[in-house]
Image (cartoon, rainbow, N blue to C red):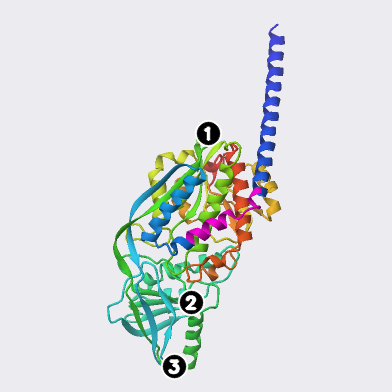
Amino acid sequence: MSVRLSLSTAIAAVLLATATATAASAQDARTIAEAEALRDRALESNAAYAIVSELTTRFGPRLAGSASEQAAARWGAEQFRAMGFDNVAVESFPLALWERGEARVEILSPFPQPLTVVALGGSIATPPDGIEGEAAIFETYQQLLDQPEGALTGKIAVVLQDTVQAQDGRGYGATSPIRGQGPTEAARRGAVGYVLRSLGTHDHRFAHTGATRVGEGTIPAFAMSPPDADQLRRLIRLTDEPVRMRLFSSAGFTRQSESQNLVGEVRGREAPDEVIVIGGHLDSWDLGTGAIDDGAGVAITAAALKLIEDMPRAPRRTIRVVWWGSEEVSQPPPAQGLAGGRHYAETRRDQMANHVAVSESDFGAGRVYSLGLPAATPPEFRQAALRVLTPLGVINDPAPATGGGPDTGPTVALGVPAFRLNQDGTDYFDFHHTADDVLDRIDPDAMTQNVAAWAAFLWLLADSDVDLRATQAAQP
């Protein structure tokens, strides 16, 4: 009797497991089919382009803490509510407002001429009469770093190093310390001013701004256009005379203000407390209209979530879109940057265990060409994702994703896994942080492909119970 019972129990367990596996397989097939349908539906419209067009037309530049950035957030909240998103909120935080003022740099001798420049974000002003001095010109940043303390006393440090063009933007990653730390390093060696070749990959005569370190020990700092850097290269080959320059800037922090994160979500039907976070940053530099950096990102992610909100049923998990504030401008110590990203993470520190994954679209609107997932991703989930994304021209990135974009950094630091929908950024740094960052630089078809990739992938992840950090504790 007990043998028959044990046998019956075993058979029942096998039948139950088989039925459960069959049901799970059917559910997976349904989820994949829905993701494919979302992908195809996204390709039929230019919803993201409509969002970024209206955003940049209504508000133009959106410098962190400015009235324009604040108005854009209020407008965004109206758009989120109209899209049907849940729990829409504008979450404000204090911010020191930096304003550009005027900037001028000129060569005084031996061949007098003006240079096309912009002040670096967070840089301080010169005295009212400007700064004059001999230029110490370096072909590479390392040559500056090789100088001992005191070697540049009273001089203006100039770095001519180029930024190399690359699909994944790694050239910019290699040269960004020239802007971020360069002024401080030059000051440590006695320099009274700092000029670098813009961190751009074009050859047009406009300069790129961008943040530099803020705090004691910094000096007035500028970026010049790539052709002006080339001009200096040629100039120093024509003469043995020292080059003298004059710098003027009225830039600086002017008052206390506030920035904000805009939050909205589509609530999950079965596991609403499990949250996937996506988004972009709403603020921009003040030279262009912030179309590629990062109007494109906020538009892509919001449009993707709207497609999911329109589905007949909600995904299993919650998807939260965040339009982060104040990604661009550095802040006085102790906080140097990513004020919006830090505010989001700090105000939800006790919720991070329920954050499933995080990622940001902050690399323009170039086509998505690869998918990067955490090391812990189950192979079957990766295979399903690639099945859905391959028709869009998206391939697998075998390198484990360790970050999801700048604003996600503070959240990733608290243990949340990141994924990446990697975009083609070959020409991104032609326009990034310049007056040429405008709507005309966006290819609507490429932007639509982004929305399709985001919507399809998000549905797969949100309608599953896959755990992207299941084995992360074992990672070194």
Q: Quadrant of the N terminus?
A: top right
Horizontal side of 43 relative to 178 (left or right) equals: right
Tag 1's secondary structure?
strand
Tell me the tag on residue 32: none
For badge 1, the amino acid type reads Ala
* Front residue (pair 392, 347): 392
Left or right for 418, reference 388: left
Which is more N-terminal, label 1 or label 3? 3
What amino acid type should be assigned to the residue bearing mark 3? Asp
User: Nearer the viewer's eye, disc 2 or disc 3?
Assistant: 2
Q: How far apart are labels 2 and 3 at the CA level?
A: 28 Å
Q: Give the percent coordinates (x, y) of residue 336.
A: 37, 59
The kind of secondary structure the magenta stretch mainly shows is: helix
Give the x, y percent position of residue 420: 57, 52
Q: Quadrant of residue 245?
A: bottom left
Q: Position of residue 144 (x, y in %)?
A: 43, 76
Task: Please tell me in which quadrant of the rendered image residue 333 appears.
Answer: bottom left
The residue located at (54%, 51%) in the rendering is: 301
- Few, some or many residues within 10 Å of mark 3 (<14, 14–19, 20+): few
SS for dot 2: loop
Q: Is the residue marked by circle 1 packed among few (<14), some (14-19), or many (20+) residues within 10 Å? A: some
Residue 271 is marked as 1
Task: Work out whether residue 20 can be spotted.
Answer: yes
Residues at discs 3 and 1 in contact (Cβ within 8 Å): no
Residue nearest the viewer, comparing 1 with 398: 398
Look at the image and say whether residue 360 sits in the magenta stretch: no
> What residue is shown at x 38% (from left), y 56% (from top)?
70
Amino acid at the residue labelled 2:
Phe
Q: Look at the image and give the residue range highlighted in magenta.
A: 41-56
Nearer the observer, 373 or 386: 386
Q: Which residue bears the numbered disc 2? A: 206
The residue under label 3 is 240
